[in-house]
Image (cartoon, helix red, strand yellow):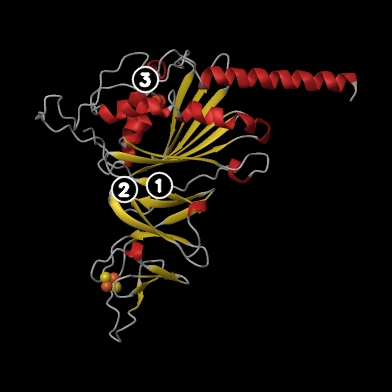
Amino acid sequence: MSDVTEERASEEAERAEQYVKAVHEAVIPKPEFSSIDNPANTEGQTSDYGFTYELPERPDPPPIPNGWFSITASADLAAGEIKSVIAVGRELVVLRTEAGVATVMDAHCPHLGAHLGGGWMTGEDINCPYHGWKFDTDGTCVEIPYSDARIPSRACVPSYEVREQDGFVYFWYHTGGKAPQYEIPRVSEADDPQWSAAHVWQFEMKAALGEMAENNVDYAHLHYVHRRPNIPNDTSRFIPNGYFSEVVESLPEGPDFVRYTYGPGIALLRITDLMTIYATTTPIDRHHARLNWHFFFPRNVEHVAEEMIDGVTGEFGILADIPIWRDKVYRNRPILVKGDGNIAEFRQWYSQFYEDSNWDG
Ligand code: FES
Ligand SMILES: [Fe+2]
């Protein structure tokens, strides 16, 4: 190596190191105490004196929004496999045919109601475990093996629109039964050889989807819950764009964050040159959420993967939000002040995913 090239290489290495350091400070704070021990939860607790308290029911959180939701990671569904999944407040099955097609349908057979999760696949069809009725991937009954009666036209299992791309199987949920209103953008990192394979993180928690989503534009909580030293505020922009939105943060000293949101179930957080989080969030019911996140790293920084993932998901990351979501109630008319970020704008944008778009609790 010539002197000049050597110098340039070392400059570059130094820049890379400074960059990682700046990200550390922004993503992985080292405060003296954390918030995850927050003992506020009183729901369901009995008193030390043996009483069960009588309290009014907490108001319902926001409803389940309409959109594309992941039901499984592609890698977790083999050809010929049937899995039972509870999502969007429904019992569902997701299956993969021998040819590799992923399908999502309601779990209960139209005949006498058996759960199809206990059934089996033959080629492209699913067979009910109770009397062997056979259904194709549209949910249409194609064979009643013990009867020569004409197949009743009502013998159908409701099925869902499915998209499989970039490592996830998605299904379309709409409370009013409407067809898909948007398509899911592709994520280039998912099959780019310059980027790592997906580092998988999965979790379930008590949190309504709308409450969780709002967190991303709630800047003041970043300090109190996540112990971040710098709170973005003037540095942050929320850009609604139809069914999608973007949050762009440019911290004065530190990396650029862009958070793309594709409907209520999919988000993509890109920290330039360092990490991309492909975050899918699925409502299990109105009160609970399932997180299935894929982290990608450029190959040259993959050695910091574990630390970065812990920064996002660990005690100063999402774990710190959990007791807040678990114990809070939804305020339909919150008192918002300067410094509260883009909560009002975000709610306005998000309300389009509720069947009753005037939903405000
Ligand atoms: S209940 Fe499914 S075939 Fe009878
Ligand atoms: Fe948070």
- Residue 341, by quadrant, is top left
Q: Amino acid at mark 3?
A: Ser
Q: Residue furthest bottom?
A: 148
Q: Residues within 10 Å of mark 3 (few under 14, many from 20)?
A: some
> Which numbered disc flags the more N-terminal residue, 3 or 1?
3
Q: Could you tell me which residue is drawn at 67 percent across and 36 percent down?
A: 299
Across and down, in percent, residue 266 comes to 44, 40
Considering the numbered disc 3 on the image, is that residue within a helix, a strand or a loop?
loop
Is residue 346 found left or right of 96 in the rendered image?
Answer: left
- Residue under label 3, please give it: 35
Across and down, in percent, residue 133 comes to 33, 75
> Which numbered disc flags the more N-terminal residue, 3 or 2?
3
Name the image quarter holding the N terminus.
top right
Question: Label 1 near label 3: C-beta < 8 Å?
Answer: no
- Cα distance between the residues tagged 3 and 1: 30 Å
Considering the numbered disc 1 on the image, is that residue within a helix, a strand or a loop?
strand
- Residue under label 2, please give it: 88
Q: Is residue 279 above or below residue 50?
A: below
Name the image quarter holding the C terminus.
top left
The dot on residue 107 is none
Give the label, 3 or 1, closer to the camera: 3
Question: Label 2 near label 3: C-beta < 8 Å?
Answer: no
Question: Label 1 near label 2: C-beta < 8 Å?
Answer: yes
Q: Amino acid at mark 2?
A: Val
Q: Could you tell me which residue is drawn at 52 percent across and 51 percent down?
A: 165
> Which numbered disc flags the more N-terminal residue, 2 or 1?
1
